Amino acid sequence: MTTSRRVLIAANWKMHKTISEATRFASEVRSALAVPAPCDLAVFPSFFAVRPLVEALVGTAVAVGAQDLHWEDGGAFTGEVSAAMLRDAGATVVLVGHSERRHVMGESNDVVARKLAAALRSGLAPILCVGETLAEREAGRQRAVVETQLECAFGAADATGAAKTVIAYEPVWAIGTGRTATADDAEEMHRAIRAWFGGRFGAGAAAALRIQYGGSVKPDNAASLLAREEIDGLLVGGASLDAGSFLAIARAAGARG
């Protein structure tokens, strides 16, 4: 392994964990987490749990973020949350364009682009999620689909903003299904993403870009995925709800040479 990119393991809790459950998780992580941490770590709880989790994890290497944000800085958008609100709660990172936002909530590429711009404008570090459906992969369109998502998301971004962004490749057919892309499949797409990024922002930016894999990640497949040089981290769903499982994945990241 020759890359100098530091591995990022991120826990996306989706619509799980009350505030008390989130802080209990934090207590378990605090007591077991090695110092220094074996990799960069981030947790994405519900909006309600951001502030309590920030307070529970203060002094650790675990960043706390939000699962979504609105593209406007404020206004008459009932039920929405702005980047300024997230920052005030202590969030430092945010997910943008998760497959469930795209395919369940109906977010278009344009909406994702506006949210990415809002995150960068506010100083939140975004993790931009991209990925294809099973039908798109079976039709051989996976690379075209992902490149279109990238082109739309970064359409108005400059090199400075792009450098602050992590990309998470999450094939939609592997999200919560128990079906994981093979390490070969994941690395092939990560390599394609890096090539696109290099064409848009330059070879240096591409070399520094961190690209995570997400999709039915578990402790027993984390090491094999992270053994691939193009895979710089993991965006973990269900397996991140248990502190022991999350820490086991972090340890797998620490074993990457």
Image: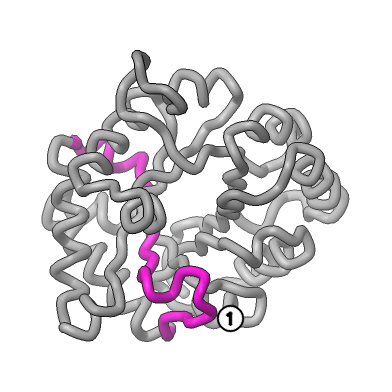
- Residue 240 highlighted magenta (yes or no): no
Residue 49 in percent (x, y) is at 67, 35
Residue for point 42% across, 69% down: 231
Q: Amino acid at mark 1?
A: Asn
Answer left or right for 235 relative to 138. right
Determine the residue located farthest toward the top in the rendered image: 75
Q: Which residue: 62% across, 43% down?
A: 45
**Residue 31 shows up from this direction:** yes
Colour convention: one colour
Q: Which residue is drawn at the image coordinates 58% and 81% (left, top)?
A: 221
| Viewport quadrant of the C terminus | bottom right
Q: Say which quarter of the image contains residue 74.
A: top left
* Nearer to the camera, 108 or 147: 108
Q: Is residue 41 visible?
A: no
Residue designated by label 1: 221
Residue 246 percent across, percent down from the top left: 69, 62
Question: What residue is at 42 percent from the left and 23 percent from the top?
Answer: 78
Instruction: Give the side of residue 245 with respect to residue 237, left or right.
Output: right
- What crowding class fits label 1: few (fewer than 14 Cα within 10 Å), some (14-19), or many (20 or more)? some
Residue 209 percent coordinates (x, y)? 34, 54
Q: Which residues are magenta?
A: 157-182
Q: Position of residue 130 (x, y in %)?
A: 31, 59
Among all residues in the image, which is located at the extreme front? 78
